[in-house]
Image: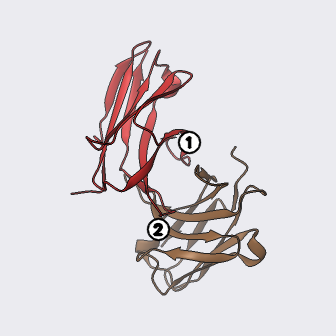
Chain colours: A red, B brown
Amino acid sequence: QKEVEQNSGPLSVPEGAIASLNCTYSDRGSQSFFWYRQYSGKSPELIMFIYSNGDKEDGRFTAQLNKASQYVSLLIRDSQPSDSATYLCAVRAFGNEKLTFGTGTRLTIIP
Amino acid sequence: DTGVSQDPRHKITKRGQNVTFRCDPISEHNRLYWYRQTLGQGPEFLTYFQNEAQLEKSRLLSDRFSAERPKGSFSTLEIQRTEQGDSAMYLCASSPLYEQFFGPGTRLTVL
């Protein structure tokens, strides 16, 4: 079992709709959770991070964390063509500095 | 632009040659990380510095890899006797505490 799992996609969403990206993790000691956006040929760009159960909102983005289910998600409201990218989920364990990444979900927003 | 810079942006080398990459983190960040990313995968952790101290190294970091961060400022990653399997994007990230901000990366191609 991979430490961080994401559906590789591609996930196609119409412009203006809500895109929902999911991530599960295996280490119950995981403490904080990060979402990065990566355009083709570019480096990952931090969108947001979450460490408490529940929702955290930042503009059009909402991160949701359920530690009991070992599940974290990212919702993108009012999806735009510029949101088309690969979204990487990353997890940081307690007492550990490194991030462990999933393989990413490729999202395509259809105009 | 996160403020993290990497040099060079691209490097093509022949198998067996040595290469060195440089990373300049955001000046007030004392944490610095190196990751490697291959096509279709998420970044994989290589090593971590807090100030000038190298505090963690991945098993991925074979004896051919060495990293330094003299004086706790910029960092260098050297790969000796490069192999074709070393071809990847090498990413540097800096952090004030939790969030990690990536530089643009150095794309290495080993022929």
The answer to whether residue A38 is left or right of residue B54 is left
**Which quadrant of the figure has residue A63?**
top left
Residue at 63 percent across and 64 percent down: it is B32
Which residue is nearer to you in this view: A47 or A66? A66
Is label 1 in contact with label 2 (beta carbons under 8 Å)?
Answer: no
Q: Is residue A10 above or below residue B21?
A: above
Residue at 78 percent across and 57 percent down: it is B27
- Dot 1 lies on which element? strand
Residue pushed farthest top?
A16
The answer to whether residue B69 is left or right of residue B45 is right
The amino acid at mark 2 is Ser
Question: Residue B88, image x and y in percent?
Answer: 48, 63
Question: Residue B53, image x and y in percent?
Answer: 65, 77
The amino acid at mark 1 is Leu
Residue at 35 percent across and 32 percent down: it is A21
Which label belongs to residue B87? Answer: 2
Q: CA distance from mark 1 to mark 2?
A: 24 Å
Question: Residue B101, image x and y in percent?
Answer: 62, 50
- Dot 2 lies on which element? loop
- Chain ID of residue with mark 1: A
The answer to whether residue B86 is left or right of residue B90 is left
Which label belongs to residue A46? Answer: 1
- Classify mark 2: residues with Cα within 10 Å, few (<14), some (14-19) or many (20+): many
Residue at 72 percent across and 58 percent down: it is B29
Q: Is residue B68 above or below residue B38?
A: below
- Classify mark 1: residues with Cα within 10 Å, few (<14), some (14-19) or many (20+): some
The answer to whether residue B33 is left or right of residue A54 is right
The N terminus of chain A sits in image quarter: bottom left
Question: Residue B54, image x and y in percent?
Answer: 60, 77
